[in-house]
Amino acid sequence: MPVTKLATNTKKKVNIMTSKENKLHKANKPVFKTKTIVDSKVVYDLVLNFKPDLVVIEKPFYLGINSAVVVGTTAENVGRLYGIAEGLGHKILRVPANSWKGYFDLEVEKEAAIAKAEELFPHVNLVPPKGRTKSDGMAEALLLAVYGEKTKC
């Protein structure tokens, strides 16, 4: 997923600052955090150029251990994807992870998704351009697309 960094304009709590950040705080200089968000422009261009019949998005699953910040950022990112797909007039299939993983008989481990994607798409390189190892995210994206195509929900 193409991502970018966004300054949050919120100060970190003093007890979780690094020593460098703590020095800035004591000097009354702002300490801002950044968060990683979906790069809407890049995703928009991809969807616009590809012109899919269906956009398949995995429904987020929030464990009780996730912080409000994690839940909020995840919801914001998924909302960006919905907005892009809806704005371009595409049909959206929202799929819980257990549905599409069950369809492929996958376990929780990420390696299982990589193995299944390689079985179905042996010609696809699952190593991202700047990466060194196979991407479970790329494998899962391929499997979500297959699930959407096969189930036509």
Image (cartoon, rainbow, N blue to C red):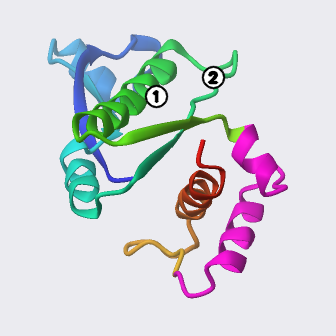
Q: CA distance from mark 2 to mark 1?
A: 9 Å
Helix, strand or loop at label 1? It is helix
Horizontally, residue 131 falls left or right of residue 139, namely: left
Q: Would you identify the image quadrant in which residue 77 lies? A: top left
Checking the image for residue 62, the label placed there is 2
Q: Mark 1: few, some, or many residues within 10 Å (few <14, many ≥20)?
A: some
Q: Can residue 108 be seen at all in this image of the molecule?
A: no
Is 78 colored magenta in this rendering?
no
Residue 54 at what x, y percent from top left? 43, 49
The outermost residue toward the bottom is 123
Q: Nearer the viewer, residue 53 or 17?
A: 53
Location of residue 140 with respect to 95 vertically, above or below = below
Main SS category, magenta section: helix
Farthest residue in the front direction?
152
SS label for mark 2: loop
* Residue type marked 1: Thr
- Taking the spot 60% from the left edge, 61% from the top edge, the residue there is 146
Residue 126 versus residue 142: which sits nearer the camera? 142
* In the rendered image, the vertical position of residue 127 relative to residue 25, given as above or below: below
Q: Mark 1 sits on what residue?
A: 74
The magenta-colored residue range is 98-124
Q: Residues within 10 Å of mark 2 (few under 14, many from 20)?
A: few
The amino acid marked with disc number 2 is Tyr
Residue 59, can we see it? Answer: yes
